[in-house]
Image: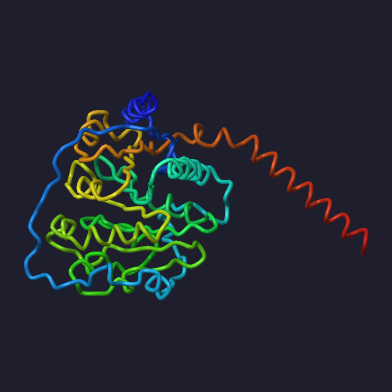
Amino acid sequence: MSRVHDALRKAAQTPDELSNRTPSVPLVSGAAAAETSAPLALQDPPGRESTPELGDLDIEAIIAEVVTYPYTPMPDALLVNTSKPREGPGEEFRTLRTRLNHLQTLQPLHTLVVTSASPAEGKSFTATNLALTQAQLTGKRVMLADFDFRRPAIDKAFQLSPSPGITDYLRGQVSLSQVIRKIESVNLHVMTCGEPVPNPLELLNLRECRQLLRALREHFDWVILDSPPLLFAADANLLATMCDSTILVVRIGSTTYDAVTRALQSLCENNVLGIVVNAARRGELYSKYNYYHDYYDAAQTAERKSAEEKAEVKV
């Protein structure tokens, strides 16, 4: 708990300390518990078409038939560069990945909600990059699902069409095979949000939503959900009751201690794994890598020069 409180205090720093910060990088995580409360129950939206029972579908066959899309991320999406694994932001996400995978060996964790207290704190950035780094592990099957029906971001990050997506499936308008997309080269599956809907919370309360999450949990090593902020909508609270765990993203100089406290108290389940602190100082993030990376770069340079000299001798 002390690491969590340290993270909260750090997140409450003043905005004038943000000048020389990197955009959105996870720095700290720790265990925390939230107070319990009764989940919100709403009526199914009227006029909805029927959706096939997921129990009757062959999920493995569906996954094998999904369309593959090229990996063409939006230039300013701030995704980790998979071709440069030694960069500081990538190292931080791999550290977070290692902690989560270790926890997965201790308890059944497969579905993870990534949320924040307020908007613009980096939850979509964190969810996307965590999914990318998880997908880099050999043999890992990872699903990134955009359950932020109010302000989706996953489709923009990967430059995909938002529809067909999750909302379209939950309304019975498309099949599951049309919603799941595979991203080439990074071994990642993605589900975009879908068409905008006037009743996002009602869709999440549908029986088909729980069935979908249950089916994905059984066929993916990690199912990572991007969800709306906790203090601006009840969506993340409801999703937390359907998933194994939750991660809260806070932004240094922006998120207040009071906002994080209220966000944790609003969660309906005691399944908060920890807090990811965003927007660390460049010096805090990169200084610890300089020694090892400088040595590695020097060794590579020496090895390349040696190879070139040997080639000249042979000529």
**The image quarter in which residue 75 lies:** bottom left
Q: Position of residue 135 (x, y in %)?
A: 48, 56
Query: Outermost residue, front direction?
Result: 56
State the residue at coordinates (53%, 54%): 137
**The image quarter in which residue 48 lies:** bottom left
Please indicate whether residue 164 sits to the left or right of residue 86 in the image.
left
Q: Position of residue 167 (x, y in %)?
A: 22, 65
Question: Quarter of the image containing the N terminus?
Answer: top left
Q: Nearer the viewer, residue 56 or 180?
A: 56
Please indicate whether residue 100 sits to the left or right of residue 298 in the image.
left
- Does 238 appear above or below 265? below
Question: Quarter of the image containing the C terminus?
Answer: bottom right
Please indicate whether residue 13 sits to the left or right of residue 258 in the image.
right
Q: Nearer the viewer, residue 139 or 167?
A: 139
State the residue at coordinates (39%, 59%): 143
- Does 103 appear above or below 55? above
Q: Position of residue 194 (x, y in %)?
A: 25, 66
Q: Position of residue 56 (x, y in %)?
A: 28, 72
**The image quarter in which residue 157 lies:** bottom left
Q: Nearer the viewer, residue 274 or 302?
A: 274
Please indicate whether residue 310 sits to the left or right of residue 163 in the image.
right
